[in-house]
Amino acid sequence: MNRLRSNPWVVLVLLSLGFFMILLDTTIVNIAVPSILSDLNTSLDQILWVLNAYILVYAVLLITAGRLGDLYGPKNLFLAGLVVFTLASMACGAAQSANQLIAFRVVQGIGGALLTPQTLTMITSIFEPARRGAAFGIWGGVAGIASITGPVLGGVLVTYVNWRWIFYVNVPIGIFTLVAGMLVIPDLRASRRHGFDPIGVLLATSGLFLLTFGLIEGQKYDWGTVTGLLSIPLMLVAGLVLVAVFFIWETFQTEPLIPLSLFRDRNFSVMNFTTAAVAFGMLGLFLPITIFLQSVLGFSALKAGLTFLPMTLVSMPIAPFAGRLADRIGGKYILLFGLSMFALGFGLIDLVASINADWYTFTLPAMVAGVGLGCTFAPMITVAMRNIQPQMAGAASGVFNTTRQLGGVLGSAVVGAVLQNRLATALHDQAVARSASLPPQFRQQFIDGFNSAAKLGFQVGRGQTGGAQLPAGLPAQLVHQLQQISHDVFAYGFIDAMRPTLLVGVAVLGLAAVSCLGIKRRQRQPQAESARKVAAA
C-alpha cells in the first residue's frame, strides 16, 4: 500500500476518476432532457434549472472549496466531495418532481465543488515540474473524454434502462473511488494557514445567481416585470453590479479568493477565457441539438447519443498526442487549430440540420468537431498551469475550474434564453403560416395556443409539440388535421429557432480561437542548452 501511495501515477488515476464522474454529470444529463421533460411533465425553463442549478452552485463554490482544501487538506475535501456527490446522485435518481430534482442537483454541485479544486492542487504537489505537463495532459484528456462520453453513455442508459440511471451510475464509481482514495491518496497539507472571505463568497454567489435567473427566466416574463418592482432587466443589472463589486472587494483583501496576480501571466489569462468559451460551446450547443434529435427527428436517446459517437472516437486518440505535442512545441497553434475545427464542426451541424436528417447526416461534422476537441483540452490545461508556482496551484486550480464552469453556466443560460426567444417567434410565424388550412373560426385560437406556450413554459420533450393550448370542442374530422399541423409547426419552428441559437456558440468558439494568438510561447533557454552541449563535449 505504501508503494501505491508513493506512486504519483496511481494517485493521478484516482483523482482523474473522481474528476471524470463530476464532469460526466455536466453532459450526461443533456441527452436525457427530452425524457425528463416528458416523465416529470415539466417545461424548458425548468429543465434549464436542472442543468444550471448544478453548474451554478459548482462554479460559485469552487474557489471557496479550493481555500477550504488549503485549510483542511486537499485529501479530506476530495473525499468529502465524493461522499456528498454520491449521496446526492442517489437522491437525484429517486426525484419525483422537477423541483426535487433541482434541489438535489444543488447538493450535487456542492459535492462537485468540494472535490474538483483538490485534483489540480494534488497533481501540482506530487509531480515534479518535468513530469507535470504529462500529468496535466492526462487530467485534461479526462476532462475531454468525460465531456463527450456523456451523450453516448446517457443514450444507452435512457434507452435501455431509465433516465434515472444517469444519476445512479455515479454510485458505484463514487464508492470505489472513495475507498481507494482513503487508502492511496497522500494527506498533503499547506505549510501555512489561510484566511477565509465570506463577504466575497456572498457577493459572487448573489451576482451569479441574479444573472443566471434573469437569463433563464427572461422569456417566461417577456423580459419585463417579475413581480412588483422586480424585473428581469433589474436582476441582470444588479447581477453585473454585484460581480463588479466582488472584484473591487477582492483587490482590498490581503488574501483574496481570486488572487488577481495570477492574471499577470498572460497564458493563464488567455486560457481562462478559452476554457470558459469551450464550456460555453459544449453545454450551449449540445442542449438544442439533443432536443432537435429526439423531439423533432424522433431519435431514441441511444440513437441521439450515438450520433455524437464519431466525435468521441476521433478525439480520444488525438487528445494524448496533442498533449505531448504541446509539451514539445507549445500549445498556441494546436489550440488555434483545435478551437477552429470545433467551431467549424458545429457550424456544419447547424448547416446540414433539417427535418429529413438522419444520424449519418451529422457524421462528418461530428468528426470535424472531434478533431477540434482532441486538440483542445490537454494543451489548454498545460498552457494554463505551465508557469504557476506550486504554492499558488490551489488558487489557480480554483480560478481555472470556476472560469470553466461559469462558461458552462453562461452557455446554457444564454443559449437557453436565445432558444426560448427564437422559439416564441418561430412558433408564432409557423402557426400563422400553417393555420391557413384551418377553418377561419379556429385559426386565431390555434395561433394563440402557440403564443401562450412562451408564457406557460415550452413543452419540448419526446412526443410534445411545444406546449401549445389548442382549441377545445373541435369537430372530430379536424382533430387529426390539427395534430399534424401542430407537429409541423413545432418541428419546422424548432429548426428555425435552432439555427441562430447554434451560431451563438459557434461565434464564441471562434472568438476563443482568435484569442489563442495571444498565447506567449515558451522561451528557449540558450544558456542552459549551451551548458548541456559543453558538458556533453
Image (cartoon, rainbow, N blue to C red):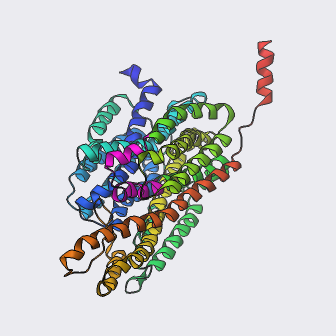
Tell me: residue 226, above or below residue 329: below
Q: Is residue 201 visible?
A: yes
Prevailing SS of the magenta stretch: helix
Q: Position of residue 504 (x, y in %)?
A: 54, 62
Q: Quadrant of the C terminus?
A: top right
Q: Position of residue 146 (x, y in %)?
A: 42, 41
In screen coordinates, is 2 left or right of 241?
A: left
Is 358 or 169 nearer to us in this picture? 358
Q: Would you identify the image quadrant in which residue 429 lies? A: bottom left
Residue at the top extreme, as displayed: 537
Q: Would you identify the image quadrant in which residue 24 lies? A: top left
Q: Would you identify the image quadrant in which residue 54 lies? A: bottom left
Q: Position of residue 15 (x, y in %)?
A: 42, 36
**Residue at image point 29% right, 64% down:** 464
- Magenta span has 142? no
Tell me: residue 461, above or below residue 139: below
In screen coordinates, is 254 left or right of 106?
A: right
Q: Is residue 80 visible?
A: no
Q: How many marks?
A: 0
Is 238 or 437 nearer to us in this picture? 437
Q: Position of residue 281 (x, y in %)?
A: 51, 54
Tell me: residue 504, above or below residue 183: below
Q: Quadrant of the N terminus?
A: top left
Is 533 or 261 nearer to us in this picture? 533
In screen coordinates, is 119 left or right of 178?
A: right
**Residue at image point 46% right, 36% down:** 313
Q: Which residues are magenta?
A: 283-309
